[in-house]
Each structure stands twice: as structure tokens, then as C-alpha cells.
């Protein structure tokens, strides 16, 4: 049923359809509307969930460690400073193989304090062992929610998932959205029945310490699970398409990429602008295409090698930096290609930091620079639209 | 054969596989004639390895670390810590 | 006693903590889930692939046991299970780094009993000062030295903090008074809502005292008035263990290496007087002596 709703409400509604047993979240802009909507749904009896009004994001994720260990389907949402505050627990959750789903309403990291959208928060947390999936629009953010649980709770995966959506851009926008049907989601998503829970009838110890003789093997098991997740993410996306008729790609997606000479690589909501820019440029005969990264972790190495093997130049645009070494997607992409036969020039741009707008003009500028780079890379990485005049 | 399981799951009560009795230098010797069966040794033992066996309070030497709390607390001085000959 | 905490754990010989745990679990019974923070208890009882726990047990991080237990408790409530949820952690994680989590748990009114085994310093990491370390104790981060008499700050009154959170049942207990400890655990389980019980658990490695005298040291803490045994129900004093034969604080202090500098250095006697003053004020505040 199509309705014009705020992105946050649409996601809260999607969470409701997944029927989590326990929701534990701490308010932080721009995630607040998601948790407020969830609280209202609980208060109105539409969502039968325990809503724990925790004292910090750290406590929020910690409470879910407990609830998940006791057998509850668990949900949280956070962003930026909050995500950073729960950093320690993120490793704990993935190490304990808790299938928790968290919506990350991507926002810039302070200092300087900034409440607007970029992806520094989740990209900066890419090593924590969580699966990271990025939505390009509100509909995908909605659809991603039940998919995230289906991936996480698979007994062969048992890995927590960050469902990432750009803060403000997707959380606070009002647009027509096909809200999910609760019964259909319940059929798509089987009930959460973990094998091991805290149960006096079968007492188990969860969270022992592992010394050097066994620690590595625990990490390896997580590593293996993310390898399996590459296929699981694809399968779940296809299943979702069959049930609900919508598909946004599996681990990657492409747009006008078949004969693209210039390929833009990115993730998140900037894709909307990029698709419009591509349509404009294609009408002018410019052979530009897009490869969307949907799963950032696990990084879709093979899929990207396949999608990018025929183009002449690759331009990565992303809303994060890795201070001291360019930026996240750019680094990962270059290292994914180094040992392959692909020798296509790759240039990278960081843009949109702290919520700075990325326009069609900006995308066209990037495409021009990419065109020039085909003949030889002048600049491997740059800050797009740097305001040199205020420095 | 150690089989590493996800979630660092561990079976309950499995520390019993480690015989901490190997740690001790002194071993408790109980004079059963003096013992009044107050069970304070059983209550205070950090290892929980003092048990009533056929009516007598006996330390389980597989686990006894020789800490001496039982001897110190026995109200009748029925337990003596003796240097263990190994 | 039930065998809910098995031997083979790696606690120091003569540690009061495992005795405390055995007493707590004996009182709570096997229909109990325990959540522990990082610390001596966690490390000595769960070295992978072994565990001393014969009840379900969960460890997450150093400072979040109360938050983690909150998640367990709401889930059990939802599943209509009446299993006890108990947090057992040391003073480091309780008084300092975990105090935010605990405050939140108290504030939300979860049916969780929080037991702090208090050995008055960060023992697992090597005897560093915590908010629970009493006045002028030598620790590795507040060492007695040429220009120092040890920890310059008083012990944080954690039970008062619990009372300020409207925790319905707050009590202090001691490993040297096992009957009293068991009674308090049972009482806390009967009163719905959060509870806070702080158990004095001397540490032979950190306090340094004669082998085997762990329980005696704990007894002296109570008998000098430095560790008052009391219960607060709904914020009011509801039970006090009177001291039968009051002892001077010196009897307690001189038996421990962590206070020995007070008997050697100038300035020591003044501190001893001040510590006697702390005992005296406890005696008056709680009516410890008839």
C-alpha cells in the first residue's frame, strides 16, 4: 500500500513487521524519529515489543547482547557519536555471533560536531565484524529491514547486520513508499529460534575468554561466515523480489553499466542523483554507468571485478575519508583489483562530508575528471568542491 | 580434541577438568575425632571441595589449593595444614 | 550446599570471591541466570574451553553487565519465565566504569539483583585504585611513597547511590557472615525490582595477609565498624548486624600489607585516627553498638 510517509516512519513500520521482541535504543539526531515512531507503535499496541529506554547507546547495544542471548529478536538504531560510543560492544556482538539488526542513520563524526549526513560512522566501523548493507532510497531502507534479519539469523551466518541509510536525506524525507505487509513479512521471515540460549534447563556459559591458543580460530569462524554471507545476501534479495516484487541488487547492482566507458562506483542515497546525472549524460552520448555497492561488508570482490572489467576508467565517490590514506571504498576497491588482471585507472573523490550537497553538476564534474584520467591520472584522490577560499 | 565453537560457548561445570590440587604446598589434615560437623569448612572453602563423605568432612585433594582457610576457621582446631611431601 | 560453582577455577588460593559466589548461588538456586562483567570472577571462572558455572552465565564487557542483564530480564519477562537474573561483578566495574549502566538499570526498575563482590581495588589488572578503595590504602596507582600515604580519597558510598535511585532493597554483607549473606540474597529475591548487595570479599593477593586468614580479615572489618552490615528497604534502615565485641581499627589494619605504611611513616598515626573516625561515624550512623 503506497503512502507518503517520512522515511523514519517507513523504517519503523518495517521494523514492526519484523516483530522484534526487544528494542533498545538511545535517541540521537537523525535517528530519533525512528525510535519515536517505534515507541508510539508499542504504546498504541500495534507492536508487541519490549522497548527499553536505555541510558546511552553503549547500554542500548549491551542490553541487546543480553536479550539476544536469552532468545529475543533484537533491534536497535543509532548513528555517528552513538555508533562510536557503542564501538566496543559492536565487536562484542559480532564476536558472540548475535544476530542483531541495527539501522544506522548515517551521520558525520565529530569533531567538529555535525549532525548531517555522511558515511564516516559506519565506514569507520567496517572492521567490527558486522555485515553492512547500504540503501539507496527509502523503499530500499524499508525492504532491507526484513532482509537484514533473514541474513543475520541464518544459523550458518549468525552475524549482526547494519542496515545503513543516509541520515536526514532518507530519514527525514517524505516520499511515496510501499509499506510492508506484516503477515507477508512474517511468512518471509521465520520466527527467531536460536540453538543456544540462556536457559537454566540447559545451562551454558556464553562469553568465556579465549587465550592465544584459540582466539584466532574464533575470528576465523566469523570470517568464514561473512564469506558465506556473500551468497546469502544475494539469495535473500532474490527471495524478497519473488515475494514482494522489488529488487535493489544483491551484493552489488548496476545502472547503465553494460557498455559504460566511465564507471562510477558508490553506495547510499547519492545514487539517486547519480542516476539522474547518468540519464542526462547518456542523452548526450556520454557512455557513463554506475556500479552500486550494496554490501560493503562483506566486500563483493568477485562481483566488482566482473562488473568493472570492461570499462576504461573508474571513479569512486564516497561520503567518508580515511585520514592518512584516502577513503574507505577507494582503498577497498583498489586492493580488490590489485591482484586481478584489471588495470583500469581508478580515481577517488570524497564528497558530501558533513551533509554537503552533491549535485548533478558535481557528478558531471567527476565524469569529466574521469575522462581526463583515462589518459593518465593526475590526481588519485581529491576532496570534491573543497572551499579553498575559506581555508 | 578441542573443537572451537561459535559464541565462545562452554559447557557448564567444565573447570572440573583442571585439577587445581597441583597448586598446593600445604595440605589440610582433618582430625575427625575433634570435628563437630559444624560444616564451616565446607561453607568457607573457596574451591567448594570440602564434602561430607560417609558423615565425615573431607577435602577433595584433586582441587584443594591448600589455602588454609578451613584450618584457620575450624572452631575446634580439627584441621592442620601440613607441608605436603610430593 | 549445591554445586552450582564448580572447583577447578583459577582463583588465587584463599580468595574470598569464590566462597561468596557459592553462597550467592546456593541462596538463589539453579533457576538463575548470572551476568558478569570482566574481572577476577569472569577470568578465573571461564577460561575457554572451561567454565565453573552450573547455571546459565553471560559475559559481555567490563562496564555493561547491568545493561546486558536488563536485556535478559525484559526477554524473560516477555517469555513469562520467573528465572532469577543476577549480576555478579567486582567493585571496579560496579563503582566506576559500569556505574552508568547500573544507574540506568536501577532507574528503569528491572527485576535484577546486583551483587558486588568488593575487594576494594582493580584486582584482576594488578591492584589499582578504584572508587571503592578506602582512605590511605596502598595500591599500585595510589602507592605509599616518600610523598604519599596512599589513596587520598574516601571510599565511594555505593549503597547510598543505590538508595538514591529508589532501589527497594539495598544491603551490605560479608563473606565472613555466610548465614547473613544467604539471608540477604534470599530477601532480595523476594522483593520485586532492582536490588544492590555489596559483599566484602578480602583479596589475599592485593591486600596481603597471612595465608588462611581471609575470613578472619573480613570478620575484623565488620567488628571494627569499618564494614557496617545493614539493610535498607525502600530507603529506610531495616536491619543492622550489631557488633558484639567492638575492636579498634588497628586490629584490622595491621593485619594487612596494604596498610602497613601507616604503621611506619610519620603521618601514619593521624591517618589511623581518621580511619578510627570513619569507624566511629559508621557506628553512630547505623547504630552498630548497643
Image (tube, rainbow, N blue to C red):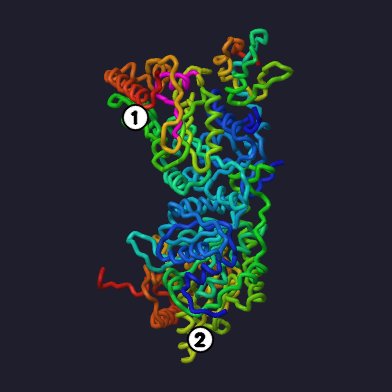
- Residue nearer the viewer, C167 or A154: C167
Marks 2 and 1 sit apart, C-alpha to C-alpha, by 72 Å
Q: Quadrant of the C terminus of chain A?
A: bottom left
Q: Are marks 2 and 1 on the same chain?
A: no
Q: Can residue C136 be seen at all in this image of the molecule?
A: yes
* Mark 2 surroundings within 10 Å by alpha-carbon count, few (fewer than 14), some (14 through 19), many (20 or more): some
Q: Quadrant of the N terminus of chain A?
A: bottom right
Q: Chain of mark 1?
A: C
Which residue position holds label 1? Answer: C151
Q: Position of residue A289 (x, y in %)?
A: 52, 81
Q: Can residue A312 be seen at all in this image of the molecule?
A: no
Q: Residue furthest bottom?
A: A284
- Residue nearer the viewer, C75 or A211: C75
- Residue C227 lies in the magenta-colored region: yes
Vertical side of B16 occupied by B39: above or below: above
Q: Position of residue C4 (x, y in %)?
A: 64, 33
Range drawn in magenta? C216-232
- Residue A54 lies in the magenta-colored region: no
Q: Which mark, residue A287? A: 2
- Residue nearer the viewer, A92 or C222: C222
Vertical side of A105 occupied by C212: above or below: above
Q: Position of residue A371 (x, y in %)?
A: 44, 82
Q: Position of residue A313 (x, y in %)?
A: 49, 78
Q: Residue at x 29, y 24 (%)?
A: C146
Q: Which mark, residue B36? A: none
Q: Residue furthest right?
A: B54
Amino acid at each position: 500500500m503506497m503512502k507518503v510517509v517520512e522515511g523514519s516512519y517507513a523504517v519503523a513500520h518495517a521494523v514492526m513487521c519484523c516483530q522484534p521482541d526487544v528494542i533498545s535504543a538511545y535517541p540521537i539526531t537523525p535517528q530519533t524519529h525512528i525510535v519515536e515512531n517505534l515507541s508510539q507503535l508499542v504504546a498504541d499496541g500495534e507492536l508487541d515489543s519490549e522497548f527499553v529506554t536505555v541510558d546511552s547507546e553503549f547500554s542500548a547495544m549491551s542490553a541487546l547482547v543480553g536479550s539476544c542471548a536469552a532468545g529475543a529478536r533484537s533491534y536497535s538504531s543509532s548513528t555517528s557519536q552513538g555508533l562510536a560510543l557503542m564501538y566496543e560492544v559492536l565487536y562484542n556482538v559480532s564476536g558472540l555471533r548475535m544476530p542483531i539488526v541495527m539501522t544506522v542513520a548515517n551521520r558525520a563524526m565529530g569533531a567538529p560536531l555535525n549532525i548531517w549526513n555522511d558515511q564516516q560512522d559506519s565506514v569507520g566501523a567496517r572492521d567490527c565484524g558486522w555485515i553492512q548493507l547500504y540503501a539507496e532510497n527509502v523503499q530500499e531502507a524499508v525492504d532491507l529491514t526484513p532482509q537484514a534479519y533473514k541474513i543475520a539469523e541464518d544459523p550458518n551466518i549468525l552475524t549482526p547486520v547494519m542496515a545503513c541509510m543516509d541520515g536526514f536525506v532518507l530519514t527525514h524525507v517524505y516520499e511515496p513508499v510501499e509499506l510492508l505487509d506484516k503477515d507477508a513479512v512474517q511468512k518471509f521471515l521465520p520466527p527467531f529460534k536460536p540453538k543456544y540460549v540462556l536457559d537454566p534447563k540447559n545451562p551454558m556459559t556464553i562469553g568465556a575468554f579465549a587465550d592465544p591458543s584459540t582466539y584466532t580460530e574464533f575470528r576465523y569462524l566469523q570470517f568464514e561466515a561473512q564469506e558465506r554471507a556473500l551468497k546469502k545476501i544475494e539469495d535473500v534479495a532474490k527471495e524478497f523480489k519473488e515475494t514482494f516484487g522489488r529488487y535493489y541488487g544483491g551484493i552489488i547492482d548496476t545502472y547503465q553499466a553494460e557498455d559504460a566507458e566511465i564507471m562510477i562506483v558508490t553506495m547510499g542515497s547519492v545514487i539517486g542523483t547519480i542516476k539522474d546525472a547518468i540519464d542526462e549524460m547518456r542523452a548526450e552520448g556520454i557512455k557513463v554507468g554506475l556500479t552500486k555497492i550494496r554490501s560493503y561488508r562483506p566486500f563483493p570482490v568477485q562481483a566488482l571485478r566482473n562488473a568493472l572489467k570492461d570499462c576504461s576508467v573508474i571513479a569512486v565517490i564516497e561520503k567518508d575519508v580515511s585520514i592518512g590514506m584516502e577513503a574507505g571504498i577507494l582503498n577497498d576497491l583498489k586492493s580488490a583489483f590489485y591482484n586481478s588482471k584489471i588495470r583500469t585507472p581508478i580515481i577517488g573523490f570524497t564528497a558530501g562530508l558533513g551533509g554537503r550537497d552533491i549535485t548533478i553538476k558535481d557528478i558531471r564534474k567527476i565524469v569529466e575528471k574521469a575522462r581526463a584520467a583515462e589518459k593518465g591520472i593526475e590526481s588519485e584522490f581529491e576532496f570534491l568542491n573543497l572551499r579553498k577560499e575559506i581555508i | 580434541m578441542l573443537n572451537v565453537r561459535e559464541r565462545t560457548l562452554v559447557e557448564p561445570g567444565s573447570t572440573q577438568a583442571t585439577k587445581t590440587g597441583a597448586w598446593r604446598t600445604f595440605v589440610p589434615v582433618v582430625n575427625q575425632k575433634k570435628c563437630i560437623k559444624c560444616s564451616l569448612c565446607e561453607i568457607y572453602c573457596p574451591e567448594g571441595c570440602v564434602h561430607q563423605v560417609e558423615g565425615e568432612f573431607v577435602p577433595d585433594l584433586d582441587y584443594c589449593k591448600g589455602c588454609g582457610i578451613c584450618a584457620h576457621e575450624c572452631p575446634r582446631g580439627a584441621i592442620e595444614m601440613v607441608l605436603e611431601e610430593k | 550446599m549445591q554445586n552450582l560453582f564448580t572447583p577447578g577455577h583459577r582463583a588465587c588460593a584463599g580468595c574470598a570471591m569464590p566462597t561468596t559466589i557459592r553462597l550467592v548461588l546456593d541462596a538463589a538456586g539453579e533457576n538463575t541466570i548470572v551476568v558478569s562483567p570482566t574481572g577476577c570472577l569472569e577470568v578465573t571462572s571461564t577460561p575457554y574451553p572451561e567454565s565453573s558455572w552450573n547455571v546459565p552465565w553471560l559475559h559481555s564487557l567490563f562496564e555493561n553487565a547491568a545493561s546486558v542483564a536488563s536485556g535478559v530480564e525484559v526477554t524473560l519477562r516477555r517469555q513469562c519465565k520467573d528465572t532469577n537474573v543476577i549480576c555478579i561483578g567486582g567493585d571496579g566495574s560496579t563503582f566506576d566504569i559500569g556505574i552508568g549502566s547500573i544507574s540506568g538499570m536501577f532507574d528503569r526498575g528491572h527485576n535484577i539483583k546486583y551483587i558486588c563482590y568488593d575487594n576494594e581495588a582493580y584486582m584482576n589488572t594488578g591492584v589499582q585504585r578504584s572508587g571503592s578503595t578506602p582512605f590511605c590504602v596502598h595500591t599500585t596507582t595510589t602507592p605509599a611513597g616518600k610523598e604519599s600515604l596512599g589513596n587520598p580519597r574516601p571510599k565511594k558510598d555505593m549503597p547510598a547511590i543505590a538508595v538514591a535511585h529508589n532501589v527497594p532493597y539495598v544491603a551490605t554483607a560479608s563473606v565472613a557472615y555466610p548465614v547473613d549473606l544467604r539471608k540477604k540474597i534470599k530477601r532480595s529475591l523476594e522483593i520485586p525490582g532492582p536490588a544492590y548487595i555489596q559483599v566484602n570479599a578480602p583479596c589475599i593477593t592485593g591486600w596481603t595477609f597471612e595465608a588462611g586468614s581471609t575470613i578472619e580479615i573480613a570478620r575484623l572489618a565488620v567488628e571494627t565498624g569499618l564494614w557496617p552490615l545493614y539493610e535498607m528497604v525502600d530507603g529506610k534502615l531495616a536491619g543492622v548486624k550489631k557488633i558484639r565485641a567492638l575492636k579498634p581499627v588497628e586490629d584490622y589494619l595491621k593485619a594487612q600489607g596494604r596498610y602497613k605504611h601507616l604503621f611506619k611513616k610519620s603521618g601514619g598515626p593521624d591517618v589511623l585516627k581518621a580511619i578510627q573516625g570513619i569507624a566511629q561515624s559508621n557506628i553512630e550512623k547505623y547504630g552498630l553498638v548497643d
